[in-house]
């Protein structure tokens, strides 16, 4: 899977760096949104651009020449989602996860998934305290703001399932007692799709809980040469320092929640996801959860582009990372070497784009060439 193309709307830097172009619209808050920050929308977007630009620059000290990959990771963070990094060994999967985690001053834990790992090694366990004559709960590594799961497909399905509740409901239940997780909460997992020895494929329910999947891919020769020059004698991870904190990330999440999503864009997202369920090449199309996570991701993408409203280009920018890993191909499609990412790209060409664009008041104009959004 190859990350989607970078939209041209982003100024100077892929994640900010210029004054964001802001339009005033009627904001539509998230269903279960936290208290909204005070101030004008452009102030929140200005802070978002500045902070995300610093985080992106930090991560790109480690991951050279992959701005699209870093963009997807930041979109996932701002969309309150989880990221699956899937690629061959040695391309920087774990480095990407660690660099993003270190760029934010918050609680971080790392889990090395192995075949003998138990669910209680992730969630925690109740231990009998002889002094109190009672059981006390010892939290596991999942109780952190950012959880890095390395080689997640090396653990058994029983252990993998320990993440299901916490990824979807942001809580952990042990011995009948439920413990809430702190906010923000993000799981960044890596896996190698090539090696089959001693691995367990992630079940569909697990993959569906990841908001985005991204593949880093090999660097181009210029980027690889720069990496050799800069990293051969020094580990850039050692110099990485936090450039934001958990409280600031939560403020940015609230800014993203207020990004306007018009009725036409909502309908376009629903039609796009629904079209995956009718493809003959698929045994399983995208779920309603996919629609919700796509909507959250496009809001984050719009905010990164400096807008407080969503346009079709935002859906095109994140559709492949958000939808492709949820699709299950038929045996015939697999034999024909079809890819789920290509199927999503084909749908982007076939599903009609809203014949409109937003004006500064948040209303749609109906004289726009739809090919501009292809």
Image: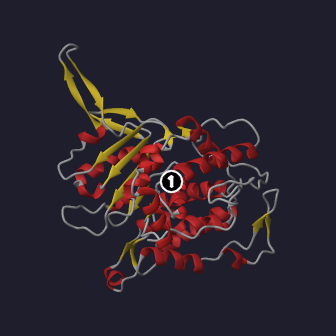
- Up-down relation of residue 128 to residue 247 (above or below): above
Please name whichever residue, 337 or 34, is drawn nearer the observer in this view of the structure: 337
Residue located farthest toward the top when viewing the structure as drawn: 131
Please name whichever residue, 279 or 82, is drawn nearer the observer in this view of the structure: 82
How many numbered discs? Answer: 1
Left or right for 112, reference 260: left
Residue 34 rendering spot, x and y as whole percentages:
59, 37
Residue located farthest toward the bottom when viewing the structure as drawn: 336
Where is residue 86, by image quadrant? bottom left
**Residue at 32 percent of width and 84 percent of height:** 335
Residue 366 rendering spot, x and y as whole percentages:
80, 72
Q: Neighbour class for label 1 at 10 Å: few (<14), some, many (≥20)?
A: some
Residue 280 rendering spot, x and y as whole percentages:
42, 81
Residue 278, visible in the rendered structure = no
The residue singled out by tag 1 in the image is: 61
**Residue at 24 percent of width and 29 percent of height:** 126
Left or right for 56, reference 130: right
Is the N terminus in the top left, top right, bottom left or bottom right quadrant?
bottom left
Left or right for 131, reference 252: left
Is the C terminus in the top left, top right, bottom left or bottom right quadrant?
bottom right
Residue 141 rendering spot, x and y as whole percentages:
33, 38
Q: Look at the numbered disc 1 and give the secondary structure of its residue.
A: loop
Rendering colour mode: secondary structure
């Amino acid at each position: 899977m190859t990350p989607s193309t970078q939209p041209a709307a982003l100024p100077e830097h892929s994640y900010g760096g210029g004054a964001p172009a802001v339009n005033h619209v009627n904001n539509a808050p998230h269903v279960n949104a936290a208290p909204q920050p005070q101030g004008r929308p452009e102030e929140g977007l200005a802070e978002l651009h500045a902070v995300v630009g610093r985080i992106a620059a930090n991560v790109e000290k480690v991951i050279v020449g992959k701005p699209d990959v870093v963009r997807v990771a930041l979109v996932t963070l701002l969309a309150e989602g989880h990221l699956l990094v899937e690629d061959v060994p040695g391309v920087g999967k774990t480095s990407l996860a660690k660099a993003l985690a270190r760029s934010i001053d918050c609680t971080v834990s790392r889990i090395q998934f192995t075949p003998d790992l138990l669910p209680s090694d992730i969630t925690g366990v109740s231990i009998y305290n002889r002094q109190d004559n009672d059981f006390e709960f010892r939290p596991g590594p999942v109780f952190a703001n950012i959880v890095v799961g390395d080689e997640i497909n090396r653990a058994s399905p029983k252990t993998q399932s320990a993440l299901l509740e916490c990824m979807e409901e942001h809580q952990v239940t042990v011995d009948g007692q439920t413990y809430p997780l702190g906010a923000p909460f993000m799981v960044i997992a890596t896996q190698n799709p090539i090696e089959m020895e001693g691995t367990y494929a992630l079940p569909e329910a697990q993959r569906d809980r990841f908001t985005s999947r991204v593949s880093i891919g090999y660097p181009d020769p210029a980027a690889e040469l720069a990496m050799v020059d800069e990293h051969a004698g020094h580990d850039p991870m050692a110099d990485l320092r936090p450039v934001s904190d958990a409280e600031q990330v939560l403020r940015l999440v609230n800014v993203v929640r207020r990004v306007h999503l018009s009725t036409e864009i909502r309908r376009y997202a629903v039609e796009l996801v629904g079209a995956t369920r009718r493809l003959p090449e698929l045994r399983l199309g995208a779920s309603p959860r996919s629609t919700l996570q796509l909507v959250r991701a496009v809001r984050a993408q719009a905010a990164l582009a400096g807008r407080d409203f969503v346009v079709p280009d935002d859906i095109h920018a994140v559709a492949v990372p958000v939808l492709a890993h949820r699709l299950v191909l038929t045996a015939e499609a697999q034999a024909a070497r079809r890819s789920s990412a290509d199927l999503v790209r084909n749908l982007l060409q076939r599903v009609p784009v809203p014949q409109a664009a937003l004006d500064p008041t948040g209303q749609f104009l109906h004289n726009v060439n739809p090919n501009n959004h292809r």
